[in-house]
Each structure stands twice: as C-alpha cells, then as structure tokens.
C-alpha cells in the first residue's frame, strides 16, 4: 500500500470540501447501484440456501443467533466491536459438555459464520471489502486437537465391544473396519454407494468434504464385506451403501449411538470423547511412522499440500500403489496394487 503524506491527504480533503463531497460517499459509491443492503433477517436465509450442507450444519446455529441479535439491522450497520461483543457472549454461553474447552470452538465458529455471510454480501454487490466488519475481528486460533492414535490394545477392545453389543454388530464392525483401513472421515463412508466400489482392484471412490473425490485402496476382505452388505440389504446402486437391516440408509445418528454405547462399556471412550475420527488419526499415524509423510498425505486424501507442509512435499506425492502398499502392511493382507516389497510385510 502506498504511504500518503499528511499534506496530500489535507489537499485532497480540501478539494472534496470544495466539491461538496463527503469522503464516506466515495466509499459507498463503489457498491452496485440500485442495490439496497438487506437486513440480517432477510439475507441469512439466502446464504443458508446457497452454501453446502456441511456449512449449513456448522454455521446454522450461529446465524440464528445473529438474526436474534440483529435481525432488523442491515449488514452495513454492524461494527467490528459489536461483532466481537457477540462472539464473547456466544463463547460465554457455550454448552459445557464433557469436551468443553472454554467455548473456544463457539467463538471461532461465530466469526467464521459471519465471514461467510459477508463474503456472499460482497460477491452479491451489497457491500465492498473495506466495509466488511467481520474481517476486522480476529478469529480465535484453533486449539490443538486432543485426538491421539489408539494403541493396539485399545483398538482391539473397540472391535470386541462393537461385535458383542448393539442391535446390529455386523454393521458396527463394518463401520469400524472401513475407517481404520481407509482413514476416511465419517462423511466419506456415509456417502459411499455400491457404484463406487471397484472390486477388481479393490478400490473405493470416496467423496469427502470440500467436494474432494479420490480412489482409496481397501483389502479384498473388506471389499467382500461391502459387496455382501450392499446386496444383502438392498442398497440401490446409486444410493448410500450403508443400510440397516430394514433397508433404511444409515445416517450420522448411527455413529452417535455407536460411540455412546461403546463409552458406556469402556469408560475411557467416554472420558476421552473417542469417535470415528480417532481411527483416522490411528491409521495415519502408523502410516506416517512407517512409510513417511508423503504416503501419509496421500493416504489421508490431502492431495493438495497443506500450507505448513513445506515446499518439498509438493514434489513427493505418493502414488496409489504406494498407498495400497501401506494398507497391505497395516492390515497384513495383500492388495492387488501393492508394490512387490509389500510381500515382506504381509508374509506372502
């Protein structure tokens, strides 16, 4: 940005005064002509309908709070100080669950929700970037995750308990095995369809957050379980594969009930708030330790190098065959795409 001397600023103000123009008028003149800035009550539903389902789920609670607080006010009538005040109030009122961390997540989501709202307002021509109050409020830094890789003994306990409890152990074991083999997120399995299975090469097409599509190796055993599950429970080829015994598609609530049940049987699960994402941490930690960071990146589906990974990581992207090799070593089961040296790890 060019540094302007006080003398130049004073001269510009003098010219504007002579022309009868307020400097603020120049700022507002950059907005699209004929557009009336909407109120929060008017604009929040518009943005909510436009964003992805995941964003709706995360930001919806905070948008409702914004409408409750400022529903009748226009987007350009709220100051950064008011936004920060709302953020602190939401943080103080955050529900104190077992994983409560001082309302930090609620504060972060409040700012993210408002930034999302104002980005759309800028794109729609209601305001300009310099009028964006949400960008002038610092978003709290994300706290380090408390998730860790599970020890083999703990992992065995999870599988044993899941296989001996609940109304559908077969389904629960399939969920656990899929996550420990693929290290995918919950949404990846819930979105999996029978048409996403490639049995010959033992690959599944995962569709995860951010619109990411990727092929992920699975063991021949897991592929057979998936094929049997889809056929036995009548999953349509282009619909979600995971099904209850009555044929109804499985949703997020099955995960919730599974981990609540496991937490009742094993107190450490409830205390540490263990979830399917811990299986992702477990698999990726093992892969990174044994096969290195490049393979772990690909195994996780992080095909675009994270900003903090360093420039070198851009040149060491792992191949699908290397991911399959890591899977073979992790599970002790051969894979059709695994590289020859994987036979030593699987004993074949």
Image (cartoon, grey):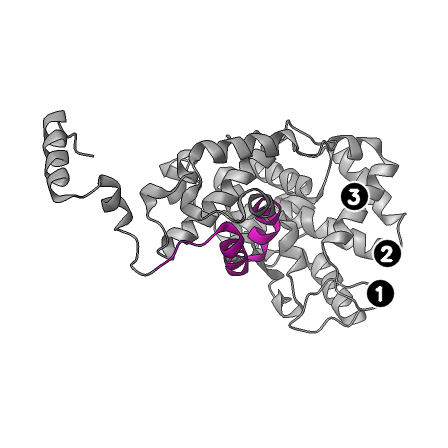
- Mark 2 in CB contact with mark 3 (< 8 angstroms): no
Assign the magenta stretch its main secondary structure: helix
Residue tagged 1: 245
Residue tagged 3: 259
Whichever of labels 2 and 3 marks the residue nearer the N terminus, that label is 2
Q: Nearer the viewer, residue 16 or 84?
A: 16
Q: Is residue 240 above or below residue 188?
A: below
How far, Cα to Cα, is label 3 from label 1? 20 Å
Q: Is residue 242 above or below residue 285?
A: below
Secondary structure at numbered mark 2: loop
Magenta region: 35-63
Q: Residues within 10 Å of mark 3 (few under 14, many from 20)?
A: some
Q: Nearer the viewer, residue 306 or 58?
A: 58
Can you see residue 281?
Answer: yes
Residue drawn at the location 54% of the way across and 36% of the way down: 108
Give the label on residue 168, or none.
Answer: 2
Q: Is residue 52 magenta?
A: yes
In screen coordinates, is 67 left or right of 94? Answer: left
Residue drawn at the location 78% of the way across and 35% of the way down: 269
Q: Nearer the viewer, residue 279 or 109?
A: 109
In screen coordinates, is 27 left or right of 186? Answer: left
């Amino acid at each position: 940005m060019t540094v302007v001397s006080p003398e130049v600023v004073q001269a510009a103000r003098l010219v504007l005064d002579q022309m009868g123009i307020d400097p603020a008028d120049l700022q507002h003149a950059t907005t699209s002509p004929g557009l009336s800035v909407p109120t929060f009550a008017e604009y929040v539903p518009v943005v909510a309908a436009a964003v992805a389902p995941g964003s709706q789920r995360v930001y919806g609670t905070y948008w409702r709070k914004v409408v409750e607080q400022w529903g009748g006010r226009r987007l350009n009538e709220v100051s950064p100080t008011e936004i920060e005040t709302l953020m602190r109030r939401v943080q103080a009122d955050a529900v104190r669950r077992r994983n409560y961390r001082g309302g930090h997540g609620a504060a972060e989501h409040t700012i993210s929700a408002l930034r999302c709202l104002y980005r759309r307002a800028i794109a729609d021509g209601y305001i300009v970037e310099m009028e964006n109050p949400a960008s002038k409020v610092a978003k709290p830094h994300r706290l380090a995750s408390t998730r860790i890789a599970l020890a083999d003994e703990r992992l065995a306990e999870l599988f044993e308990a899941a296989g001996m409890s609940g109304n559908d152990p077969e389904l629960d074991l399939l969920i656990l095995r899929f996550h420990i083999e693929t290290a995918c997120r919950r949404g990846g399995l819930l979105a999996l369809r029978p048409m996403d299975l490639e049995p010959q090469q033992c690959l599944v097409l995962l569709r995860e957050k951010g619109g990411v599509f990727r092929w992920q190796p699975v063991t021949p055993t897991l592929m057979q379980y998936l094929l049997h599950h889809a056929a036995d429970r009548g999953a349509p080829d282009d619909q979600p594969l995971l099904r209850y015994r009555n044929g109804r598609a499985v949703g997020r609530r099955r995960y919730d009930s599974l981990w609540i049940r496991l937490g009742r049987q094993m107190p450490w699960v409830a205390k540490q708030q263990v979830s399917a994402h811990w299986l992702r941490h477990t698999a990726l930690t093992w892969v990174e330790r044994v096969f290195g960071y490049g393979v772990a990146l690909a195994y996780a589906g992080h095909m675009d190098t994270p900003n903090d990974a360093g420039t070198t990581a851009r040149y060491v992207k792992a191949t699908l065959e290397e991911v399959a090799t890591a899977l073979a070593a992790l599970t002790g089961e051969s894979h059709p795409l695994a590289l020859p040296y994987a036979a030593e790890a699987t004993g074949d």
